[in-house]
Amino acid sequence: MKQTILLLLLLFGFMGNAAIQQIKNPAEKAEKLMLVNPKSAFQIAEQGYKNNPDRRTKLRLLFVMTNTSGMLQKPLDVIRYGNEALSVANDNDVVTKIKILGILGNTYQSIKLNEKTRIYLDKAELLLSSPKIPDSLSYIKGNIYYLKAMNYFNSLDSDIALSYFDKAISQYLSSKHPYAELNLKLAYLNRAFTLIEQKNLGQALESLKMAGINTRETAQIYPPHFVDLQSDFVDLAKAKICSIQKNTELSNDILLKMLERRRNSPARDDIENDVYKILSDNYLEKKDIKKHDYYQELYLKRLAQTNTDAAVWVNKLITQEEITSKIENEAITKKYIYSIIASLVFFLSLLIYLITKQLKISRKRSLLEKKVLDRL
């Protein structure tokens, strides 16, 4: 029921640059391309990675591959490259580690692995207290707090979720990052949904006012898709409030207009699950069982598909981790075997050396004994 993360690139990406063709460094070129063309950025980073660069360049390339995999909706690649990046990072790469942990946390959230999500986000939050994090990076701090808020919201712990939304909002308000305003809107929106779950409708409406976008004045600073989707989620929240207040006519009017508006939209998302759920509840309240059953069936069908999709990703992740574990175990076994062989060669050489030395000593002793006997 929430606009979780719209375009991960807006959370952790770099700014684009028109002068891309003049850049020769693959890491820099890939970074500049992330917003413009994530697929090309990934390909450039992947090719640069194959050339066995130095550690610092490798980390930059892995970050691009992690981030663009998220944009291209490839969660298994995000997890693969993200964890590899963490293994390459050292104690001085705190900011990059926080970004990657945030991306990984969000990815696990997208496939409904809440516990995994919290593990990575807790690590990221712990790093926020590092003295190597300057105050100027309030935008990144806000992102981590926002992701943690979403995790607690999805875990049905609304009080903690609210505290993290407030932290995120505070950081975004103090940030000068060009996307801080966009993420601020997301934070207010999902704060409103959290308050709705608590039946705190007055404060929820106040948050929705802050989440709304005045398209006449400020739409130019937001991507068009974001403006449309944000507006839909604000309407969804208002419809839910009306439903709770038993104003089912107004709630249904908002929701049906939303479905009509989105009918020919090429992009489909989980917002329709929530539209169908509220419509189903509203018609049950009105005792229109036929329409209640119709929208409930649509809701349950889409919910089942969402859960199936998540289960598929989890199974793929398990398979990927098993393969990775097998490869690592084989590498460890080979290393162990080589270590045993090296040890055997060393000790055998040492034994031969000691035996040879002992034989020489024995010969010398025999010669000395012979000379003594000859003199008797």
Image (cartoon, rainbow, N blue to C red):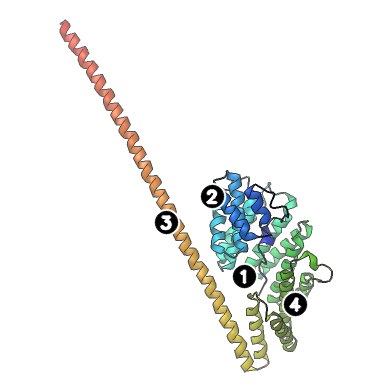
The CA span between labels 1 and 4 is 19 Å
Dot 2: what SS?
A: helix
Disc 1: which residue: 154
Q: Which mark is residue 201?
A: 4
The answer for how far apart the CA atoms under marks 2 and 1 are is 39 Å
- Disc 1 marks a residue whose amino acid type is Asn
Q: Cα distance, mark 2 to mark 4? A: 54 Å
Q: Nearer the viewer, mark 3 or mark 2?
A: 2
Q: Residues within 10 Å of mark 1 (few under 14, many from 20)?
A: some
Q: Residue furthest front?
A: 21
Q: Nearer the viewer, mark 1 or mark 3?
A: 3
Say what secondary structure mark 1 lies in: helix
Q: Quadrant of residue 9?
A: bottom right
Q: CA distance from mark 1 to mark 3?
A: 33 Å
Q: Is residue 242 above or below residue 67?
A: below
Count residues near mark 2 (Cα–Cα under 10 Å), then give few for <14, some for 14-19, many for 20+. few
Three-letter code for the amino acid on which mark 4 is drawn? Leu
Residue carrying label 2 = 50
Residue 220: horizontal and vertical position, in percent? 80, 66
Asked whether the viewer can see residue 240, the reply is yes
Name the residue tied to disc 3: 326
Q: Is residue 147 left or right of residue 368?
A: right
Q: Quadrant of the N terminus?
A: bottom right
Q: Earlier in the sequence, mark 2 or mark 1?
A: 2
